[in-house]
Image: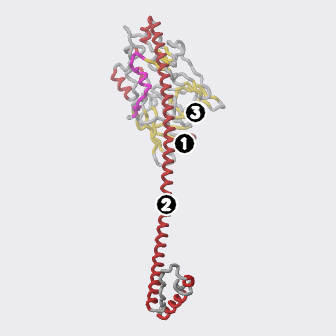
């Protein structure tokens, strides 16, 4: 700003400035001084340089004061904003604290409720246990009183088992013998191991095909072998496949009179020769057969043991069924399309020769099952079997027991309809419809 402009502004300020009290135009000058001793202020020349400098200094002070006032205002605003933020933060913290306190209160209430429930359940359990103990004590006292009243039979009660009913309503049997007998050990079960390691495989006829159904096929006996665990020998027979360039090997129980290198014919038009396989419809009544099928194509189910055979009784015309007599004497009706081998199974008379010594029985059963040796009950002690004990080997009471006998007593003839030796002819069971 130029000096001339500054001078103009100063002149305007001086012109508009109110007159001091000492001037003649002021009320105090018109009415005189307030105090007689007051000294009249001398007149000041406002046009002097001193006055100008004073005015400039005052203007500068006013500007600096305005700047200071503005800084104070900004500082106060910042302080107020900071205080508002701090107050909001304090409010949020207070709210969080209240929420945590509420959660703790609700959790404490739930804990108290759960604690009360557990206490109630514990009281109920204690009450049930006390009642059960009282019931068992009462029953025990009744049992002791009954035993005391029957002192004459106390010896018999100590030998035999008596039943005690517990508070839950179930029955338990108490045995004074303290031994688990053989029948109980079997009922508990164990790991089953089958004695089939050295077996030669399953025996059955060749699967039926078109050529066998309408004509015949030819095979040759390659070998006759022994199968451990089976009384009858096995014949290994080889056929030529009718539809593919390959051999088909099958094996079934050998027929009496069969030899290595023999030709075996299978089919509807095969001859009635021992060893050949034919449908029952192609055989006359009275034919001796073995390895008979129950249903057409099942490869043989009946008369497969050593020396066993079935016999054709007759054919039912119009029904397509054939009547058979099985090795047991039972009569059965099967379909005429079922196949069978002509002849008797080899190995007959095997059971006619006695074993004579334990070693042969050992080798016989080691490839069959764990059923040898078997100790008789009358040869045991009374603590090991109900039939044991005594000065000589005898059961001493009827060997027939009830079906619902408890384990440890369920030995002998279980729920037998009749006892004794069957006298008279063998019963023949008639079964209709091949069932």
Q: Report, in whole angstroms, how far the alpha carbon at label 2 lies from the one at label 1.
A: 100 Å
Is there CB contact under 8 Å for labels 3 and 1? no
Image location (x, y in percent) of residue 227: 40, 32
Of the two numbered discs 3 and 1 in the rendering, the one whose residue sits closer to the viewer: 1
Residue found at the very far top of the displayed protein = 152
Residue tagged by mark 1?
209
Does residue 191 belong to the magenta stretch? yes
**Residue 23, above or below 287:** below
**Residue 87, above or below 312:** below
* Secondary structure mostly taken by the magenta-highlighted segment of the chain: loop
Graded by Cα atoms within 10 Å as few (under 14), some (14 to 19) or many (20 or more), the crowding at tag 2 reads few
Image location (x, y in percent) of residue 39: 47, 83
Residue tagged by mark 3?
282
Of the two numbered discs 2 and 1 in the rendering, the one whose residue sits closer to the viewer: 2
Residue tagged by mark 2?
87
Of the two numbered discs 2 and 3 in the rendering, the one whose residue sits closer to the viewer: 2
Please state the extent of the stretch shown in magenta in the rendering.
175-196
Is there CB contact under 8 Å for labels 2 and 3? no
Q: Secondary structure at mark 2?
A: helix
Image location (x, y in percent) of residue 23: 53, 86
Render colour scheme: secondary structure
In front: 202, or 68?
68
Does residue 53 belong to the magenta stretch? no
The answer to whether residue 36 is visible is: yes
Specify whether 94 is left or right of 229.
right
Q: Earlier in the sequence, mark 2 or mark 3?
A: 2
The image quadrant that residue 352 belongs to is top left
Q: Secondary structure at mark 3?
A: helix
For the C terminus, give its image quadrant: top right
Graded by Cα atoms within 10 Å as few (under 14), some (14 to 19) or many (20 or more), the crowding at tag 1 reads few
């Amino acid at each position: 700003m130029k000096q001339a402009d500054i001078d103009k502004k100063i002149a305007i300020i001086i012109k508009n400035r109110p007159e001091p009290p000492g001037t003649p135009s002021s009320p105090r000058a018109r009415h005189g001084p307030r105090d007689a001793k007051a000294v009249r202020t001398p007149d000041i020349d406002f046009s002097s340089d001193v006055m100008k400098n004073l005015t400039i200094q005052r203007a500068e002070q006013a500007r600096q004061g305005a700047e200071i006032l503005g800084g104070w205002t900004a500082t106060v605003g910042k302080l107020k904003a900071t205080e508002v933020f701090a107050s909001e933060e304090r409010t949020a913290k207070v709210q969080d604290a209240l929420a945590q306190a509420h959660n703790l209160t609700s959790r404490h209430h739930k804990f108290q409720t759960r604690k009360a429930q557990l206490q109630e359940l514990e009281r109920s359990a204690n009450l049930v246990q006390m009642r059960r103990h009282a019931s068992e004590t009462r029953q025990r006292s009744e049992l002791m009183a009954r035993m005391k009243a029957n002192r004459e039979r106390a010896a018999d009660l100590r030998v035999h088992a008596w039943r005690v009913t517990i508070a839950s309503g179930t029955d338990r049997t108490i045995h004074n013998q303290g031994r688990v007998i053989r029948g109980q050990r079997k009922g508990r079960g164990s790991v089953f191991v089958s004695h089939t390691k050295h077996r030669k495989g399953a025996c059955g006829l060749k699967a039926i095909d078109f050529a066998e159904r309408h004509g015949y096929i030819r095979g040759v006996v390659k070998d006759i072998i022994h199968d451990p665990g089976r009384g009858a020998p096995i014949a290994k027979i080889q056929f030529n496949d009718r539809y593919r360039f390959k051999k088909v090997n099958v094996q079934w129980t050998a027929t009496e009179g069969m030899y290595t290198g023999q030709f075996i014919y299978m089919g509807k038009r095969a001859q009635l020769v021992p060893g050949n396989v034919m449908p029952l419809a192609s055989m006359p009544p009275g034919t001796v057969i073995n390895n008979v099928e129950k249903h057409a194509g099942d490869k043989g189910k009946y008369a497969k043991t050593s020396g066993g055979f079935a016999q054709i009784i007759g054919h039912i015309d119009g029904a397509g069924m054939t009547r058979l007599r099985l090795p047991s004497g039972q009569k059965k009706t099967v379909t005429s399309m079922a196949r069978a081998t002509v002849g008797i199974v080899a190995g007959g008379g095997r059971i006619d020769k006695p074993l004579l010594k334990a070693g042969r029985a050992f080798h016989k059963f080691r490839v069959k099952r764990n059923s040898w040796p078997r100790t008789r009950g009358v040869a045991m002690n009374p603590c090991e079997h109900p039939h044991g004990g005594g000065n000589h080997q005898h059961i001493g009471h009827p060997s027939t027991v009830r079906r619902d006998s408890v384990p440890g007593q369920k030995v002998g003839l279980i729920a037998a309809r009749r006892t004794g030796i069957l006298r008279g002819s063998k019963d023949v069971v008639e079964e209709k419809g091949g069932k």
